[in-house]
Amino acid sequence: MTTQIKSLLLDTRLPRLEVRMLLEHVLAKPRAWLLAHDTDPLAPETAAAYQALAQRRLAGEPMAYLLGQREFMGHMFRVTPDVLIPRPDTEVLVETALECVAGQSAPAVLDLGTGSGAIAISIALARRDARVMASDVSAAALAVAAGNAWELTASVRFVEGSWYDAVPAGEGFDLIVSNPPYVASDDPHLGQGDVRFEPRGALTDGADGLEDLRRIVAGAHRHLKAGGALWMEHGWDQAEAVRGLLAAAGFTDVHSRRDLAAIERISGGRWPGRG
Ligand code: GLN
């Protein structure tokens, strides 16, 4: 007996949108094709491929890992379990970064802990003149990021290492951005939903959630030009603490911005420099 595409579209175990996306993925066809061909017979191996993905989805694996991609800032990024899945909330960090360097030509930008490269690559694509460097401590993550830069034709220099250890001495930046791990190690959220499948090291600092943010703030002055800016993403309840870190380190014009859910999601400031 042959299965029709239609019979899988009626799979009620998963939300309709997810069923459709998984089917489009195994068939490698767009939505319009799927709807016009819903009475076509489905090859047994395609049906099996769908069932395998559906089972993994039912076991909780994120859609982005099953599909191997996620859109961010209008670009499609390849993602694997080696990297955090780009979040729409992080777009405010990219938008703010672009505003920061709006008046400068050939700005030097550093993205610390780049993961899939979503932030660095989005900046590089929006500002073709920018000199963008991106670091990660994970070689596997850097391989994903470099693949994305290649696919999207972004010019980004990737460096491997922990935070500023990765950055060659003497490089001065107009802007440093980061979406570091900021979830506290005892946050029950780590055991729920998609994040269970994401790299633990990209989510939590293994401490109170502010450890890596502190490190990034503390080292920034050695890598920022006078007047350069630092912007970081952080947790829903960390804005005040991060503003405090920035102010205590000597940053001026310290403030936070809200994400799509109106939560203060990023904080930053300007390094006045000396003299
Ligand atoms: N926003 C992510 C979450 O809530 C955490 C990302 C991060 O730690 N940088 O799961």
Image: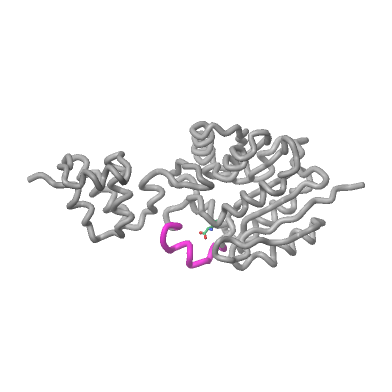
Q: Is residue 57 left or right of residue 38?
A: right
Query: Which image quarter is the N terminus in?
Result: top left
- Against 186, residue 197 (above or below) is above
Image point (32%, 42%), residue name: 30
Q: Residue furthest left?
A: 1
* Span shown in magenta: 184-195
Image point (66%, 56%), residue name: 213
Assess whether residue 81 is covered by the magenta stretch.
no
Q: Is residue 2 left or right of residue 225?
A: left
Where does residue 239 sit, x and y in percent of width and height?
66, 65
Image point (79%, 61%), residue name: 248
Where does residue 136 sit, x and y in percent of width and height?
59, 42
Assess whether residue 186 is covered by the magenta stretch.
yes
Question: Would you identify the image quadrant in which residue 268 lies?
Answer: bottom right
- Against 75, residue 206 (above or below) is below
Figure label count = 0
Quadrant of the displayed image that contains ligand 1 = bottom right
Judging from the image, the colouring scheme is: one colour
Where does residue 267 sit, x and y in percent of width and height?
68, 59
Q: Is residue 10 left or right of residue 30?
A: left
Where does residue 50 sit, x and y in percent of width and height?
25, 47
Image point (57%, 40%), residue name: 121
Question: Would you identify the image quadrant in which residue 128 lies?
Answer: top right
Q: Is residue 65 left or right of residue 93?
A: left
Q: Residue furthest right?
A: 275
Q: Nearer the viewer, residue 35 or 95?
A: 35
